[in-house]
Image (spheres, helix red, strand yellow):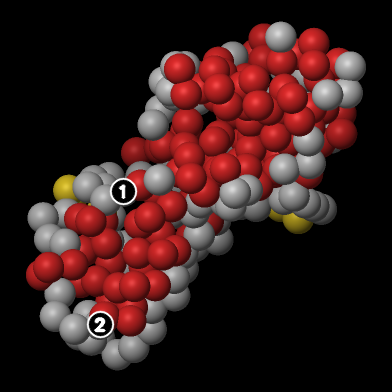
Amino acid sequence: MSDVLLQVGRAGEALEVLREALQLAPNDSDIKLSLARTYRLNGKTSAAMVILEEMIRLDEASAAARVERARGLFAEGAVEDAVREYRRALDEDPDAADQEFGERLGITSSDADDLDDLDRPIDGRQRISDAGADDAVDIAPTRSDIDFGDVGGMADLKRDIQRKIIQPLKHPELYAAYGKKIGGGILLYGPPGCGKTHIARATAGEIDANFLSIGIHEVLDMWVGRSERN
């Protein structure tokens, strides 16, 4: 029914129908995808992206959902991210291809499999890497065993993290209803030992998430291409 309403230009009514349907079946990924698509077509790209990113976080995203997210990224001007997401969707399911959208991204069926090829020219520059798959560093995330109760002080910072990170992740449907996008980050700075990593680990504990701590020495490399690979 929502598709019919969209076809006759009644996008607002289509949104109401899909919202009501999602209340009855909150775990239905097809309804979520339809709602995200309708939000985007109604000019509410941020609301659409909230739903799609939540689907990806919950591992509910089909290839079609990733294509829809690529459309949202493209609409927001993040063309490179859109290309990356679209190629990932095709890697999962080639049948999810949208020829017209692919052409807008500059992707054809002949180059859709080039996502991980670091040695091809990009923007006229050659990326060079002699690193093989065996050189990859296996860094496993760990479940955080602390939360804000283990962090003394920092009340203002805790409030900022609650407002910008924790609450949007805990209540994505509320933020989606107001067209707010979840995600993003907070830059922490200061000398070693001032508590940056500790508060970050506690934030992960607040949302029962894995925590991955990476030092700059684990990313930068003297050889061309290896820092990009890391």
- Residue 45 in which image quadrant: top right
**Badge 1: residue crowd in 10 Å (few <14, some 14–19, many ≥20):** few
65, 179: nearer the viewer: 179
Residue 206 left/right relative to 130: left
- Residue 199 in which image quadrant: bottom left
Q: Amino acid at mark 1?
A: Val
Vertical relation: 159 (above or below) 73:
below
Which quadrant holds the N terminus? top right
Mark identifier at residue 154: 2
Vertical relation: 67 (above or below) 137:
above
Query: What element does badge 1 sit on?
Result: loop
Q: Earlier in the sequence, mark 2 or mark 1?
A: 1
**Residue 219: x percent and y percent?**
40, 63
37, 5: nearer the viewer: 5
Q: CA distance from mark 2 to mark 1?
A: 34 Å
Q: Residue at x 27, y 62 (%)?
A: 203
Q: Residue at x 35, y 47 (%)?
A: 170
Residue ID for mark 1: 137
In the displayed orientation, state which residue is furthest to the bottom. Answer: 191
**Residue 79: x percent and y percent?**
75, 47
61, 126: nearer the viewer: 61
Q: Residue at x 39, y 72 (%)?
A: 160
Q: Residue at x 44, y 75 (%)?
A: 187
Q: Amino acid at mark 2?
A: Met
**Residue 225: x percent and y percent?**
55, 56
Residue 216 left/right relative to 183: left
